[in-house]
Image (cartoon, rainbow, N blue to C red):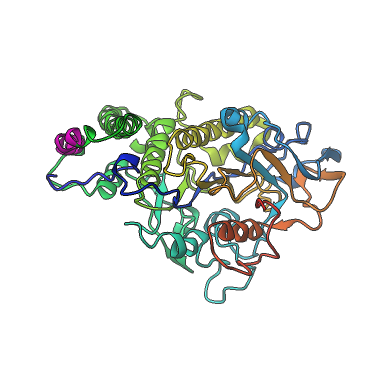
Amino acid sequence: MGGSILSLPWMESLAAKPSAEVARRLAFYYVPIGVVRRTFFPGEENGVTPLFNRDNFNAEETKTRIPKGEHPLELTATMKPLGGVREKVSLITGMDRTFQPGTDVHAQCASCFLSSASPFSVKHSPYPQARTLDHIVAEKIGGRTPFKTLEFSCNSHKDNKESIQFDNISWYGTEYVAPSMRDPRLAYRRLFKSDERSSYRNITDLVLEDARSLKRDLGREDQEKFAEYFDSIRTIERQLSRLEGLKEELSKVDLDVPMDGKLPRGEYIRLMGDLMVVALQTGLTNVATFMVGPERWDTPYLYESLFDKPRSHHQMSHNQKKFIEDLIKVDHFHMEQFAYLVEKMDRIQEANGKSLLDNTLFTYGSGLGDGATHQYSALPIVVAGSGGGTFKTGRHFNLSEQSGLVPKVAGKYVAPEGGVPLANLWLTQARAMGLEMDRFADSTGELGLLRA
């Protein structure tokens, strides 16, 4: 094998006996800075555009009607990219987190997103941060995988003016970060155990000779699956080669932007996402986190299909009046990348006749409900997949107990009384993965999202 190993997906032809038992997976896709509410949430199309400096905003009170309970899924403008997998995703609204005063709002919303500890419950840290859900679940479902968890990030900038709290959502415990993979080349080598003497571009070549002899023993469907898998690996290698060329060319461009910021965002995100999907597909891990970008990071990125020059997501969010249309484009862009990964997972068939997506809970979310007002209430949450048939899909679940009119005053969303803790969703997902838990962080109970 030349010092390189490629894990293979499940093949019926090679199984000693057919088995319908397939691992459940848990994955997260974190988007920073919140979203533009009017194009993300059903019923908020006519909401006030919030300003970051709320003291100077004297707009009249407006009211937005938000539905209550369980409803058919309405794909709003931002959610349109999910149209191809509409029946396999659900929108969950009315989820809140409680901000602990004394720390930065961006740092806390990212670093505490998957821990959701109660304010001031952690005594030896300024953050309500504890062991995150991914690591707790991995103790149950990740024991037989080479990697209990894998952490991916699409921020390779070196000009870090912020602390690690702004740039990580996965934590072994309070103040013990789980380092994320940010360089796609290094991630490839780690996942496929490449010998440093071998170029990643040659890894597949090293195993193709054995692969060809193996392929002759496979049935027709498995041969197609085998070809699809190797095509996926080849595509990753070609993308890596292309990004190498881009880096070399972009290093010659005289722009006051770090070189990694000039790389096309969509290509970078999809490449890291492809690596995550292959890792889940082949059983390298059953639990993964994917951070699209950091919180409050002013270094601009090149959104190649949106703008001519690199732009700062964070800076735009603080002036929604001026950049509202650009922010909507960024939200749609992030959703397009999520939809790309969801659809890719849905095309991968597994031993139980379901797709990789069907056997996974893949959660899109942000720690802010709105980047301008820094609200921790009414967070944007989308769950794709059913976790092996445990989760309801194709619906909009509004978990707020308050029905009727929810006011927006001076551009600031007023959280409904009785907002549901985000930790309730994490508790529900943990139980869907087979954990016997009575409580997680500040949860108050399981959500009614599981199938009977």
- Horizontal and vertical percent for residue 148? 38, 59
Q: State the residue at coordinates (69%, 40%).
A: 395
Residue 228 higher or lower than 379, as above or below: above
Magenta residues, dominant SS class:
helix
Q: Quadrant of residue 109?
A: bottom right
From the viewer's side, name the closer residue of 180 and 289. Answer: 289
- Horizontal and vertical percent for residue 439? 63, 68
Residue 222 higher or lower than 372, as above or below: above
From the viewer's side, name the closer residue of 295 and 185. Answer: 185
Residue 218 in view of the camera: yes
Residue 228 higher or lower than 144, as above or below: above
Q: Quadrant of residue 302?
A: top left
From the viewer's side, name the closer residue of 158 and 16. Answer: 16
- 208 magenta-colored: yes
Specify start and end residues of the magenta stretch as a single range: 202-213
Residue 311 in view of the camera: no
- 418 magenta-colored: no
- Horizontal and vertical percent for residue 153? 41, 47
